[in-house]
Image: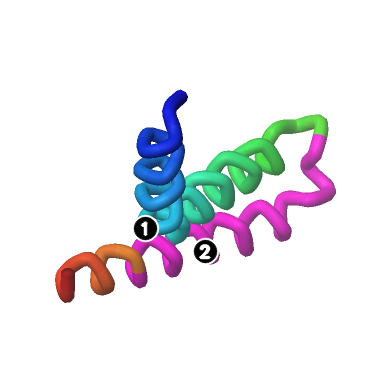
Amino acid sequence: MGRSMKATFLQRLQKNTLGVLASLSFFFGSMLFLPTFASYATVGVWLFMTGSALMFIDIIRSLND
């Protein structure tokens, strides 16, 4: 990757940080609903709620762009 491509990628990643964090929260939260991790289901619920809140904040923020 050229220098300008790296800068563009980093700028896009920075702009989408909340979306990335929301996606990771959903992913790891859903993993905790698997039978193997059933004892951590409450943490999974909290991660899902966090992902939802981050996504909501990201959408509201993007309306102002």
At x 47%, y 49%, the residue is: 20
Q: Secondary structure at mark 2?
A: helix
Q: Is residue 62 left or right of residue 14?
A: left
Which residue is located at x 81 percent, y 31 percent? 36
Image-based side of 48 in relation to 6, left or right: right
* Residue 61: x %, y % from top left: 27, 72
- Res. 45 image quadrant: bottom right
Q: In the image, residue 13 lies at what x, y percent? A: 43, 48
> For the image shown, how many numbered marks are present on the structure?
2
Q: Secondary structure at mark 1?
A: helix
Q: Nearer the viewer, residue 7 or 39?
A: 7
Residue bearing mark 1? 15
Residue 5 colored in magenta in the image: no
Q: Please give left or right for residue 26 compared with residue 4 in the image.
A: right
| Left or right placement of residue 20 versus residue 12 in this view | right
Q: How far separated are the C-alphas under marks 2 and 1?
A: 22 Å
At a point 66% along the width and 37% down the height, the residue shown is: 31
What amino acid is at disc 2? Met
Q: Which residue is mark 2?
A: 49
Question: What segment carries the magenta color?
Answer: 37-57
- Quarter of the image that includes the C terminus: bottom left
